[in-house]
Amino acid sequence: MASPESAVNGPTMTAGAASKSLRNAFGGVIAFIILVLIGVLAFSIRLFSVIKYESVIHEFDPYFNYRVTQFLSKNGIYDFWNWFDDRTWYPLGRVIGGTVYPGLTLTAGTIWKVVNSLNIPLSVETVCVFTAPIFSAFASWAAYLLTKEVKGPGAGLTAAALLAMVPSYISRSVAGSYDNEAVAIFALVFTFYLYIKTLNTGSLFYATLNALAYFYMVCSWGGYTFIINLIPMHVLLCIVTGRYSSRLYIAYAPLVVLGTLLASLVPVVGFNAVLTSEHFASFLFLILVDRQCHLSSSYYLLVQVFIIIHVVALAYYIKGILSPKMFKVAVTLVVSVGLAVCCAVIAILIAVVASSPTKGWSGRSLTLLDPTYASKYIPIIASVSEHQPPTWPSYFMDINVLAFLVPAGIIACFMPLTDSSSFVILYIVTSVYFSGVMVRLMLVLAPAACILSGIALSEAFNVLTRSIKFQLPGIAGNPSIAEENGSSTVVAPNDIPKTEEAAKEKPAKKNRKKEKENVEKKPTPSKTEKRLLVLPLEASVIAVLLLVLLGAFYVVHCVWAAAEAYSAPSIVLTSHSNDGGLHVFDDFREAYSWLSHNTDVDDKVASWWDYGYQTTAMANRTVLVDNNTWNNTHIATVGTAMSSPEKQAWEIFHSLDVKYVLVVFGGVVGYPSDDINKFLWMVRIGGGVFPHIKEPDYLVSFSNLRMLTSQTYLFACLYPKRDGQYRIDAQATPTMLNCLMYKLSYFRFVETDGKGFDRVRRTEIGKKHFKLTHFEEVFTTHHWMVRIYKLKPQRNRIRGKTKKSKSSRSVSSKRDVRGKRNPWH
Amino acid sequence: MGRSSSTVKETQALFQSLRSAYAATPNNLKIIDLYVGFAVLTAVIQVVYMAVVGSFPFNSFLSGVLSCIGTAVLAVCLRIQVNKDNKNKLQDVAPERAFADFILCNLVLHLVIMNFLG
């Protein structure tokens, strides 16, 4: 909004100023009401899952967070900080206090404690389920504050409204999705707001708040590295484009020091804020540091920009106190000395960085630079579906209309280019790149897209409504409109006869400087005023209507996405029967509650790592591996067991004290994410550590034909291009048909329909009638989706042959058919 | 040869003008500069000590060095805000407000340091 000019010219201006302040106050009240409504909108649009299903925690990771919050609420913060969890990753255990990002659990725990102390009896689960919608409302308000700093309150309100509804953010913060991103996005936007505020005001108070908000972000999410890389880049950009000012120094330098300290305080980050390797020997200087301690690359950037900004600050200070001639002398002196030192330093740096194999970056961050790195070297990172690059339609699904409002916003940020608008441009550019690498990072793109679209829409509305207002009869000749300088203008054919101000503008079109025609205007400073041109009235009205229609389409899409696409709790599945009725598949919770009621507290359950968090949280049983996936060898052990024949699998599980094995099977109902579909990943991960598991053994290929029957050989001849296919029907390899996963999934499957037709793979299974020798089935859920087996105890006596000693057995079985030694024999 | 003597003369003139310009700064700014110099000197001493003795425990070293550098940085920010020449570039902050901000930031910094010192 234009700030009101001080009333110096007589009574007419006083009345104008009074009405203007009244209008400002009225605008403030309206803005407040709109913000409240935006908060309510952000909260309610995320409640679809609660309405359609029930107030339950979704997916897998939130169950772990929920379990940790339960522990925190029951045992207090000191026990939580020092918690060593022995009910997961048996027999290794997991140090929860040091490996979890505490922000989310501490936030929810605090809310629960405060609410309960006010005698509002909310359970921990309710607080956990509704934390995400509450913080999404806060995030919208933070986006309003941020965009207000960049462009003004109108853009702020638009950006807040867009962020409240954007589907990408909804997908990770729906009610029940109790995950780190729920609070982290709020912390991200709020930190950026405080940084921009410090940049605009130059106040150390906001710099302190900025550091504290950054601390909250570090506590909440691993994505804090985005902030600590973006801010130095922006500072460098400002310095390079000549926008250095003392406010920049105040915004950046305290953040570096305080931010590093605060980041190191969080146990899960610890010294990784500064270094990357575990052992830190003594180090002498920054460059020589890398030789021994491998200073982390993001910290490199931070420190180097820190040094650069000090150099620049010193240079500006000296420039200020010296005369220009002396300054030139100083510059030549410094440059000649510095150049020699720089060359030496760069040479050393290059040598040091080139000597380390991965140049100091961890696996996950290397994926961001080279998207094919993970699939080549680390199968676990490649197997997570969230780490795949997104497809083009997913952009339109997730940010919809904003996808083509963003370029307009970028242009609007250039008119005029300020520090804060350059920051927003840098933010969107980097987040677009990173979102192109991993689907999961579309979430970081969402706030940036909303901010820029808010700016674009607000500017467009500004111009259009100003055109309308200027041309409506009866409100013509508004001096307040003509006074506005610095706002964007539109170039348009100026053929409609207007007041004499506009007529005088025509001859002035040649030269850029505009004369002051209006005598009531104060003499403004000497910077060139933008000239005010307007669009035709009809075009403006239609354009406004079309923009409103665009917004309506966006709202419709967001509500649809929230209701249909992103509200599935994935622990409860539904389907519609032919007559329109709703059929609910609650098999997961059925299995977990069976486990918790029919097994001992100390029994160990083995399953694939996807279900680890849910098993510990809902069934309260010890698991071998869970979604944290921090120990690849342990996961590979479970994967090997699932891929081995029954006897070997039994031995692996028995050596790990496992009592029950859990598999998820979707063949009866057509549930596609079951263990048989994930089985190839088990083989790959297991084969990565234990070489006797080879993936081609499980795939049907031309070279495997000698193991197939003659009938299938004939069949295969008709289709020669059947290389490397994953099959479970009669043409599957014997290794596949004998492995534990196949047997546990399809045991007694033929009894369901008589033919053993798998609805997911759409074929009949290969081996239909078989018995289990080392496992016994103890529970299968209603729709056969979860099947639980118990390990049969060792036989007390062995008929026939006497048991040979271990060493002779290992000698005899050394010559394996496959040629590689099986470490489990 | 003439060029080198002229550059020597120029550098002497440069340092002369630097010294005279710096002597003209008001006293309160010079006190702040002295404080900054002291803090940086303490940090350098700590780094040298760490190079001699070894970096265990690392958190103590980090907190010590960063506390020195932190107070130095904050003092520089205070100097920027209090400097009368900067009035037109910065928003008008009263020197008392700037000092209060400085105190607050130092409080937070030292709270974190004491927690991290171990």
Image (tube, rainbow, N blue to C red):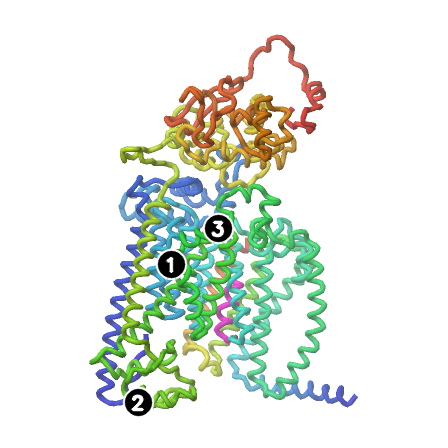
Q: Give the amino acid at mark 2.
A: Asn
* Residue wearing tag 2: A518
Picture coordinates of residue A331 (x, y %)? 64, 81
Residue placed furthest toward the right:
B1
Specify whether A410 is left or right of A38: right
Q: Main secondary structure of the magenta part?
A: helix
- Label 2: how many Cα within 10 Å (few below 14, some 14–19, many 20+): few
The chain that hosts pointer 3 is A
Q: CA distance from mark 3 to mark 1?
A: 17 Å
Sequence-wise first label, 2 or 1: 1
Q: Residue at x 45, y 57 (%)?
A: A445
* Eye-nearest disc, 2 or 1: 1
Residue labelled with disc 3: A390
Name the quarter where the N terminus of chain A is drawn: bottom left
Q: Quadrant of residue A309?
A: bottom right
Give the image location of residue A22, x and y in percent.
23, 75
In the structure shown, which secondary structural element does the residue marked by tag 1 occupy?
loop
Where in the figure is residue A153, as x and y percent of width and height? Answer: 33, 69
**Inter-mark Cα distance, 3 to 2:** 56 Å
Q: Secondary structure at mark 2?
A: loop
Drawn side of residue A242 relative to residue A760, left or right: right
Q: Which residues are magenta?
A: A244-258
Residue under circle 1?
A401
Q: Amino acid at mark 3?
A: Pro
**Tally of marks:** 3
For badge 1, the amino acid type reads: Val
